[in-house]
Amino acid sequence: MISFFFKKNFYDGWDNVISLFIPNFIFDAVLLLGGTLFFIGTKLGEVAGLSLWLAAFFLITVLCSILILAWAESAKELANYEISGFKEFFAHIKTSIFDGIKYGATLFLLSILTLCGVVYYFRLAPFQEKQQLPFIGLLTGCIFCWIALSIFSALFWYPHIRATYHNTFFKSVRKCFVLMLDNLGKNIVMMIYNIFLLLISVVMLGIAPGMAGLGLARANFLRLLLKKYDYLEELAKDKEKCAANPKRKIPWKEILKEDIEITGTRTFKSFFMPWKHDTP
């Protein structure tokens, strides 16, 4: 499943590279706005500057959340071999505002709590005494960081869970945690892959793959991963199959057969000249 995911996601990203540009440009513009506000905050007094930073951080988090939720809808369509252009993306923005505000506010609150926790447990604030941390304090701080990382890792699935099921906010969040806990290994692989895409995005100034590329990757990954639960549901209904597979192993090649056939295999030439077909 993992190897096929890398292949499919690369093909989908290449085929829809133009569709990734507009969301990425808008996302970059929002981040530029945030950077400008943070810079202005450095020129103000301590209280006024901190207030502006918090307001800017909240504003940027909410705006980015709305964009991410809107793109998740488009990414889901692209992952399903459908066509989704700029018009569809802007239409999705209108329907993502309400949930985007809730999602952004949640991430903002968790980010502030995480920052305060790290400062407290690791004594990073300038007014705290600089002395060696006791073992219990260091252990508690590490546990706190792992819990925070796990919560953020689960919540990053929310845009695509929402795009797939369109449940209520809290029901979608609950599914995010179920998905993460039930697929820890694959979730770690996806996290590493996202970090890789993020590093490329920094080099490319967010133009590619950028926010849109990361969203498409998660949409593809979730689409393939959910086929596992469709198979398990069918397995539970079929007593013969259940008896033949008591350990409930997932036959990925079987359940991904249709996707493998649709995705196909390409040569290097076909990436740059898709109108030319290779002759056997």
Image (cartoon, rainbow, N blue to C red):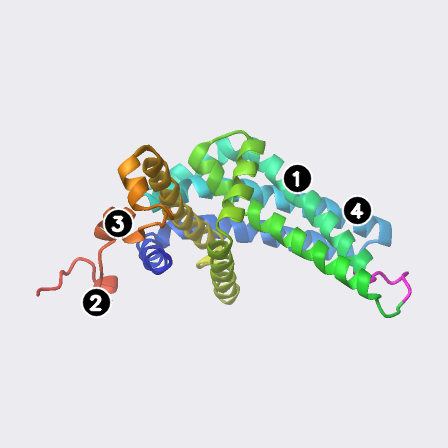
Which part of the image, by quadrant, shows the C terminus?
A: bottom left
Give whichever of discs 4 and 3 has the lower sequence position. 4
Out of 37 and 235, give the one closest to the viewer: 235
Give whichever of discs 4 and 2 has the lower sequence position. 4
Q: Are marks 4 and 1 in contact (CB under 8 Å)?
A: no
Q: Nearer the viewer, mark 3 or mark 2?
A: 3
Instruction: Please name the predominant secondary structure of the magenta segment in the image.
Output: loop
Q: In 3D space, how far apart are the residues under numbered discs 4 and 1 (Cα atoms)?
A: 16 Å
Q: Are marks 1 and 2 in contact (CB under 8 Å)?
A: no
Which amino acid type is shown beneath numbered disc 4? Ser
Q: In 3D space, how far apart are the residues under numbered discs 4 and 2 (Cα atoms)?
A: 54 Å
Out of 20 and 115, give the one closest to the viewer: 115
Q: In 3D space, how far apart are the residues under numbered discs 3 and 2 (Cα atoms)?
A: 29 Å
Q: Could you tell me if residue 82 is visible in this image?
A: no
Q: Could you tell me if residue 176 is visible in this image?
A: yes
Q: What element carries label 4?
A: helix
Q: Is mark 1 on a helix, strand or loop?
A: helix
Which part of the image, by quadrant, shows the N terminus?
A: bottom left
Count of numbered circles in the view: 4
Q: Tell me the tag on residue 254.
A: 3
Q: What element carries label 3?
A: helix
| Residue 31, position as x, y percentages in the image | 59, 53
Give whichever of discs 1 and 2 has the lower sequence position. 1
Q: Name the residue under label 1.
A: 105
Q: In 3D space, how far apart are the residues under numbered discs 4 and 3 (Cα atoms)?
A: 55 Å
Q: Mark 4 points at which residue?
A: 51
| Residue 253, position as x, y percentages in the image | 27, 53
The residue segment tinted magenta is 122-129
Q: Name the residue under label 2.
A: 269
| Residue 260, position as x, y percentages in the image | 25, 52
Give whichever of discs 3 and 2 has the lower sequence position. 3
